[in-house]
Structures are given as C-alpha cells and as structure tokens.
Image: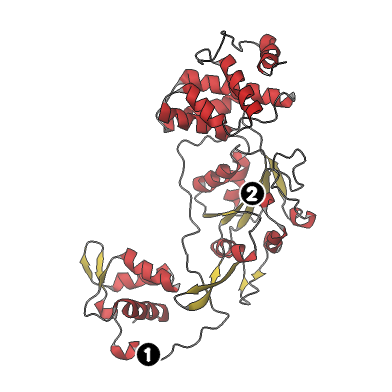
C-alpha cells in the first residue's frame, strides 16, 4: 500500500509518460520525477524497497502504477497555503575531508564549537584569502557534521534565506530556504561574507537567538533541531572598511552583531604554517619544488612586512600563493606563474611585487644582479631598492 506522496509520484509519472504495463526505472530516474513535484526522497526509497528488482540498479514499478480510474481528469484538491515543500533536498551535506588541508590558527576552536552541538553563533573576521571559509568546512568534515553554506551578496534577501513561493509544474509551492533547512536538520549554517549584505539580512536576527522561527509566508513555526548553529565569515567586523580595501563591505546593525556570542580574528598563517600549506598544495598538484616553496614563503613574508611599514598597499594572501602553485603545476615556469598571478594588482603594486620576488629568487630572468634576503641586515635596503626609494 502506498502513502499519499507515493501515489502522487506514480500519478505524476503516468501523466508525464503515459500509462504502460511495465515501468522499469533506476533510483536516479525515480528521484528526478520526485524532485519535479517536491516529493522527498525517503518516499522513493520506501517504494524501491518493495519493488521487484529487474536488473542491477533497475526496479519494476508496474505493481504501483495507478489504474485509469486513478488518473482521470478530475481537478486535484487545492493546495493549502500552509503546506510547505522543498523541491531541493540535498543542500545540506557533510563536507568531504580534504587530505591536503593544514589545521592551523583558530581551527581547533572552531572544531570544538562544531563538535559541541551547542547553538553558539560565531563571527569570524580576517583578511581575504586566509582560510576562514575552508576552516569551517573542514571542521564540519572532521566532526561528521552536516553543513550548508550561504553566500551573501547585496541582493540577498529573506526570500533567498528563509524561502519563498516557486512555480513548479504549474503549481505554486513554497520552497524552504537554506536557513530553514539547516534549522530542521540541526546542521551548521555558514553565512559567508556576511558583511557584503544589505539590511535585508536582518531577517536572520531571530534565527541568531536560537529560538523557534515562524515562516511568515506560510505560518509554519520551525524549531531548531539539536546541533543547529550559525557561523559567519567577514573581511571586516561589520563596521565597514576604512581603508577602502573592501569597498563592498557594509555596516551591519549593532543589534544584529550583538547576537554573535564571540568574534574570532583570523590572521594570515605563520611562516612555518604557510610553508606546510605550500608544500601540501605542491603535493596536491604533483609539482613539488622545495626551493620554489621556500622562495614563495620568503617573498610573501617580505611583502607583508613591507605592507606593515607602509611600503605597499596590498598583500599576498595564502590563497594567492596556492594559486601560484596551481599555475606552476600547469606551466612549470616560476616566472610566468608569479606574473600571471599578480597581474590582478595595479601596475605599481604589481611591479613592486615582481621586483621584490626578483630579490629572493636568483633564477628570475629579469634580475640585473643577484641579491638575496639572507639576513635582517639587508632587508630594509632591498625593500627600498625594490620600491625605488
């Protein structure tokens, strides 16, 4: 005997493909039909367990096909506004462990928060490309926690986050948003780059209290399951960007920010950690070059010290170093890899970066004379020379 959802699914198949004596399908095909009308996959699996197996991965569904009386043209009962369905059910998942990921910085703290299953809203701030997002993802992977990532933009609104009505097969149904799905699953909700949003993200204010939330469009009350948590990442602390480096960063309402229990400041990794990250990436892309790895670490450290002294306006992020390694794996050319990956900067910054690199890598073609950063004594003179001072 089939339940209402399974009956609806089989009627839908008949309407799409016509009544046939025998219907043999794979689980994937059946789930595609289910997704078209918002039937959850658990009803598909229940149906397949009772269906005769025709061949490997193929099931005979003829026993469940409706009769002509079941598929007449009588109008279906109207769908009540309060009925809520979600046409996508695989947004929440356990991330895959990255064997090349290096645990560093605040990773242990994030892992402890995720593992605790406590509702503990956490705000992570730090410069671009220093591993904030991947840290949360890998913490969930290593603790076997379900996770969903929401990318915030200036256009993100309540419809994107909580959910809204969608036209599915000629019928208007409510599709739950990622926030509601994470609440129901007891998953970790990663709100990425939250400082890129507008005041429309204020719809999350109630969610950040960990209490039941009412879906205004349907009247349904959703209670967070055990384990639900919200972790946000941002390049700023929600007060905008004074130096203009993150011009799209918005000022977040103080009452909204106050709902985060802690704020974690994520710096760039230390030299030793960054060295490990580069070696792991070289291993990942099968382009191990110990000398080049050491050169990249020295170069990035030189640039960051120069940035702190006001000598340059930009820094080389850990992500940018990983991009250089990937580019090196393709072209097998140090110079080309550096130049291609710093082309995104303005001309003055790019020239300063390349000039600094030429001082730490004697193999660089444009080096007029061999100069190395072997000690702190000649560090400042090399910087001044590179910047034309």
Q: Residue 73 — which label?
A: 1
Q: Secondary structure at mark 1?
A: loop
Work out whether 127 lies above or below 176. above
The local crowd at label 1, few if under 14, some if 14 to 19, many if 20 or more residues have their Cα within 10 Å, is few
Residue 77, position as x, y percentages in the image:
47, 88
Q: CA distance from mark 2 to mark 1?
A: 50 Å
Eye-nearest disc, 2 or 1: 1
Pointer 2: what residue? 193
The local crowd at label 2, few if under 14, some if 14 to 19, many if 20 or more residues have their Cα within 10 Å, is many
Work out whether 327 lies above or below 239. above
Tell me if residue 376 can be seen.
no
Q: Secondary structure at mark 2?
A: loop
In terms of depth relative to the viewer, which is nearer, 199 or 277? 199
> Residue at position x 52%, y 26% from top?
338
Residue 242: quarter of image:
top right
Residue 303: quarter of image:
top right
- Residue 115 as seen in the image, left or right of residue 45: right
Residue 285: quarter of image:
top left
- Number of marks in the rendered image: 2
> Residue at position x 31%, y 70% from top?
48
Image quarter of the C terminus = top right
Residue 36, position as x, y percentages in the image:
42, 71
How is the rendered protein coloured?
A: secondary structure
């Amino acid at each position: 005997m089939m339940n209402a959802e399974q009956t609806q699914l089989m009627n839908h198949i008949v309407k799409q493909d016509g009544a046939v004596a025998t219907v043999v399908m794979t689980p994937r095909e059946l789930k595609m039909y289910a997704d078209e009308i918002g039937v959850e996959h658990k009803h598909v699996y229940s149906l397949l367990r009772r269906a005769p197996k025709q061949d490997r991965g193929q099931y005979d569904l003829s026993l469940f096909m409706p009769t002509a009386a079941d598929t007449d043209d009588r109008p279906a009962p109207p769908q009540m506004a309060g009925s809520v369905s979600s046409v996508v059910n695989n947004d929440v998942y356990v991330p895959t462990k990255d064997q090349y990921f290096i645990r560093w910085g605040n990773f242990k703290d994030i892992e402890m928060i995720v593992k605790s299953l406590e509702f503990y809203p956490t705000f992570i701030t730090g410069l671009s490309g220093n591993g904030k997002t991947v840290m949360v993802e890998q913490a969930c992977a290593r603790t076997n926690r379900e996770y969903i990532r929401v990318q915030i933009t200036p256009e993100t609104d309540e419809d994107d986050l909580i959910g809204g009505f969608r036209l599915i097969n000629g019928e208007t149904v409510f599709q739950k948003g990622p926030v509601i799905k994470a609440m129901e699953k007891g998953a970790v909700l990663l709100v990425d780059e939250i400082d890129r949003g507008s005041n429309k993200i204020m719809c999350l204010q109630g969610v950040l209290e960990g209490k039941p939330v009412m879906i205004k469009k349907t009247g349904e009350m959703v209670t967070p399951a055990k384990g639900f948590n919200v972790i946000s990442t941002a390049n700023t602390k929600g007060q905008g960007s004074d130096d203009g480096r993150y011009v799209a960063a918005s000022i977040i309402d103080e009452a909204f920010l106050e709902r985060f229990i802690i704020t974690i400041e994520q710096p760039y990794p230390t030299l030793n950690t960054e060295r490990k990250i580069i070696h792991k990436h070289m291993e990942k892309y099968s382009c191990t070059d110990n000398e080049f790895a050491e050169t990249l670490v020295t170069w990035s450290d030189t640039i960051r010290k120069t940035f702190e002294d006001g000598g340059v306006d930009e820094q080389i992020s850990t992500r940018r170093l990983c991009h250089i390694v990937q580019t090196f794996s393709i072209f097998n050319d140090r110079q080309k890899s550096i130049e291609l990956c710093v082309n995104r900067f303005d001309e003055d910054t790019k020239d300063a970066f390349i000039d600094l690199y030429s001082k730490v890598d004697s193999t660089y073609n444009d080096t007029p004379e061999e100069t190395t950063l072997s000690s702190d004594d000649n560090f400042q003179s090399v910087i001044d020379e590179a910047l034309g001072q």
